[in-house]
Amino acid sequence: MKFEELNLHNKTLQIIGNTKQDKANAFQESVLKAINDDRNLILNTGENNEGSDAVALAALDQEERSSGQEGTRTLVLVSDSQNLEAIQKYASRLKSDNDSITIGESGDEEAQSNSIEESHKTIFADPARLYTLLRKNRYIFRDLELIAFIGFDEMISAGLESTLANIKKRILCKCSSVIVTDTYKGQVKHAALNLVNNPMVKGFGPPPPPSISSSLTQNYIKVPPRMKISTLLAFLNDNKDGNSIIFTDSKRGTDKLYRIFRKQHMKAVSLHYKLSEERKAQRFADFTNGNAQYLLVSDISAAQFDLNNVTRVVNYDVPGNADEYRYRAGLVGSQKGSQIVSLVSKQDQSDISKLQNILGEAPVEIPLPEKARQKLKERKQKKKGSRRNGRNNKNKEEDLTLPKPSYDQLDGGRNGNYKKEENGIVTFFKKLFS
């Protein structure tokens, strides 16, 4: 997009014009649009710190917008002194007289403390030093429009998660949050979702699908019509050890399974695209820490799950492509009994055939679980009995029906020739009123 389309301040556009840059790159566009829409953003660092530079440009725009007003508008937390110096220099190149201060571990603490009290428009800061000064001065932010975390993964690796949370508590106003990080998984992802609500995530495409381990057991079960749920329950009843992830094609299917699992007193949680990131993280944690044995998933690719030790993956609906199957297989650990199994109904047959053709080691068919076979047998017997009873009932109904009238017994007969009888009902009334 062109910068003119991103709702920037006129002075910001003039400054950008001096750089002879006409269009925003993907990083600048993502950050500026997120701020305009009051959204939170998690962004890949990019090559040459493009994510950091985009934050510096956003900070400059906030400075121009708040010209003549008091209060700090942008707080940029940076993971180390080298990155801190680099982003401050880039901001200075955009505008040499920008209203910003830099707070690092090597600076004079007293001078930095005084600078905070002066309420500069932008603060570039080392998180640990900044929190020390905020706590010492009992300082809070009331006018902040943007808080950014540059090198977030490095901050988490350095044990600064609680420090970042404490800094966030000192912001007593609504503002956008931008997290710039090299990685977005595991503890980094967990910490990010604790800091920001419902973020957009940019620049983190799914990793290439893993190859399927030769030691992994791959199976499928042919499911009779209208017996998918009973087959699933029978299979899980036969395999109660460990934990299982069950993938469906729709939120409706997942919701239905969840209600059935709860009714069966099976500890389960569900995930789908309509949940907030906070609720997704909480339910995912319930599964990973053992509070739930079953994770029901719809509309979310297995590539988004940072897991590799699940006991069992069940494809309640067969995935439509081989890569998604590989992602799901990659969630399964190497412990005894590890397995990926697909429930193949008549409409899934073409999908499992495609997978068998594409995958190096195709899934092998296993028999229908015993309880499901028993239920199928009972259903067939019931259906057979129902047909027999239907025929018997039909005969009984025929016995109970009234005899069909004979045309010959009615006045007029079959041929419509009326009989002249003196003892008929009509004759009786004629005699009565004559």
Image (cartoon, helix red, strand yellow):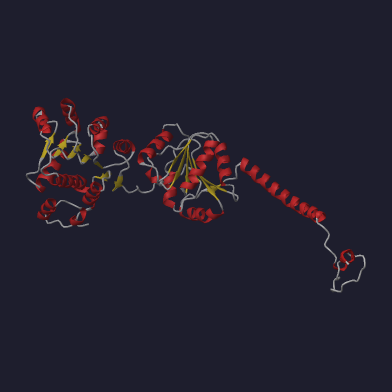
Which residue is painted at 57% across and 45% down in the image?
366
Residue placed furthest toward the top: 136
In the image, is residue 352 above or below residue 341?
Answer: below
Position of 110 compared to 311: left or right?
Answer: left
Whether residue 107 is visible here, answered yes or no, is no
Q: Position of residue 393 (x, y in %)?
A: 77, 52
Which residue is painted at 45% across and 31% down in the image?
291
Position of 278 compared to 117: left or right?
Answer: right
User: Would you identify the image quadrant in which residue 233 lies?
Assistant: top right
Q: Position of residue 288 (x, y in %)?
A: 41, 34
Query: How many discs appear?
Result: 0
Quarter of the image with the C terminus in it: bottom right
In the image, 339 versus 183, the foreground residue is 183
Residue placed furthest toward the left: 97
In the image, 63 versus 189, the foreground residue is 63
Q: Position of residue 369 (x, y in %)?
A: 60, 42
In the image, is residue 433 above or below residue 391?
Answer: below
Position of 158 compared to 353: left or right?
Answer: left
In the image, 263 versus 242, the foreground residue is 263
Whether residue 59 is visible here, answered yes or no, is yes
User: Would you identify the image quadrant in which residue 153 lies?
Assistant: top left
In the image, 58 versus 325, the foreground residue is 58
In the image, is residue 389 above or below residue 174?
Answer: below
In the image, is residue 17 above or below residue 273?
Answer: below
Quarter of the image with the N terminus in it: bottom left
Residue placed furthest toward the front: 434
Which residue is painted at 12% across and 35% down in the image?
119
